[in-house]
Amino acid sequence: MIDSLSTSALTRRNLLTRSGLGVGWLAAAGMLHAEAADATAAAVPGTLAARPPHFPARAKAVVHIFANGGPSHIDTFDPKPKLQQYAGREIPGALKTERRTGAALPSPFRFSRHGESGLEVSELFPSVARHADRLLVVRSMQADQPNHEPSLLLMNCGDGRLVRPAAGAWVTYGLGTENQNLPGFVTMCPGGYPISGTANWRSAFLPGVFQATYVDTKKKRVEDLIECIHHPLLNAEDQRRQVEFTQALDRAHLASRQHDPQLEARLASMELAWRMQFEAGEAFDVSREPKHVRDRYGDTPHGRQLLIARRLVERGVRYVQVWHGAGQPWDSHSDLEKNHRKLAGEADGPIGAFLDDLVGLGLLDETLVLWGGEFGRTPTVELPNDAGVKSPTGRDHNHHGFTVWMAGGGVKGGEVYGATDEFGFQAVEKPVHVHDLQATMLHLLGLDHKRLTYRHSGRDFRLTDVHGQVVTDWLA
């Protein structure tokens, strides 16, 4: 604004002097921004090369078995015998559910104690129960909302509203991976995407090299699991020469673009795809396993993907997410007994075989296994409505208190942490938030969740945002 000079007094010299100062500041700001961007780019690892943790780690890898849709904790790992007393009657006290629910619904499944610890597990999971003394069952988990989309994103990415980097992207950003010929972060989901789709495993504002490689494990043949795994015309030597020539052109182009991060990520993905042709085919090919091993896992999508997960962990892949229930979720608003029995029947045997193998191969101590969904379910029956619930035989969403379990990777075994109330509605003893779970997972990997940050849009972001506490009681 010009206030000290009248329009008539504004000579050409004054105008140039004042404008020149403004242009100078604009140029300086641009130079400072460029220098800051260069410094940030230099500080940010843009490759999957293995990097040291912040402090000695207990775990080297994570396998997250995601029970999509919200399994009922009351029917799996958090028994509530009090519900039987109130069966068909209103539970004392007001349950602050988001939708009106009905009377108490006791679990139709029998619980029994297992192992030296006496851990209580539903009849739905006999194979998992064999490993009771290795499980840390957290019965006091809490999320923010009772809706699938925000709760899925919260569990996977630390934020229920906006697209943020997935936990696997943060882990590979911080640690890289031990096998440069395979992706550092793999997500397996049979038959398509879950709710919120690829937002569950994106790298968002992190370099693209850290996003997950998605594999549709409904398919069986390696050629169908991984596109272009074999070249239809060129042999390996011709392909190698072709790739070397292309890489030389790419490097020259990248240098001319001042090492643009997005271009660098794309080139890294292309080079990874080339390297994968020689190792991924072997890693994803479960037919190479002995028949008795394949039989233990079962020839089902969940069985095959957990066998693949074991093979990936053996080969140094850092973060593997295995989805179960994407096509038919654990979201049992009605027919809970039938649906949970079916889904648990698909999941239990393969999970048991997976844990058996990790123990037998000596990998469980350095592999953190996490099982759970985005929330739990209510202890009361969901009433018939116009949203697909036809009969009062299921449970509604419940984020106030639910269960996840972990095994290996430096967590205690044969223990229960926290508790919901006597009906299983709300966490009342040692409540923990999803951000606490994420902070503890990073801690087990040797990462300080407050130091694992990325500068974006003028602020430092992290998986746990401004929240989260490491739950030291979980550590072995």
Image (cartoon, rainbow, N blue to C red):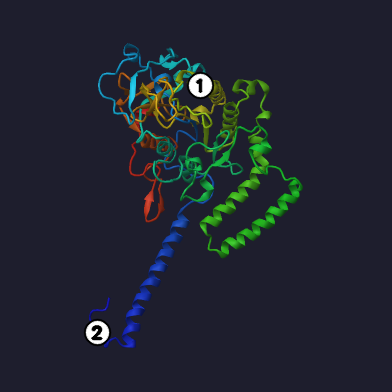
- Going by the image, does 299 lie left or right of 85? right
First in sequence, mark 2 or 1: give its number.
2
Image point 69% across, 57% down: which residue? 245
- Rendered position, 173 above or below 437: below
Q: Residue 259 at x, y = what percent? A: 53, 60
Nearest the viewer among 162 and 178 is 162
Write the residue at 68% across / 38% down: 223
Q: Secondary structure at mark 1?
A: helix
Front residue of 403 and 363: 403
What's the residue type where badge 1 is placed?
Answer: Ala
Residue labelled with disc 2: 6
Marker disc for residue 344: 1
In this rendering, would 77 be left or right of 230? left
Asked whether the residues under the numbered discs 2 and 1 touch, taking CB atoms below 8 Å apart as contact, a structural biologist would say no
Compared to 348, does 325 lie above or below?
A: below
Residue 108 placement (x, y as % from top left): 43, 14
Indicate whether 328 appears above or below 435. Answer: above
Residue type, numbered disc 2: Ser
Q: Quadrant of the N terminus?
A: bottom left
**Mark 2: few/some/many CA within 10 Å (<14, 14-19, 20+):** few
Q: CA separation, marks 2 and 1?
A: 82 Å
Foreground residue, 453 or 108? Answer: 108
Q: Residue at x 60, y 62 (%)?
A: 253
Q: Nearer the viewer, residue 429 or 364?
A: 429
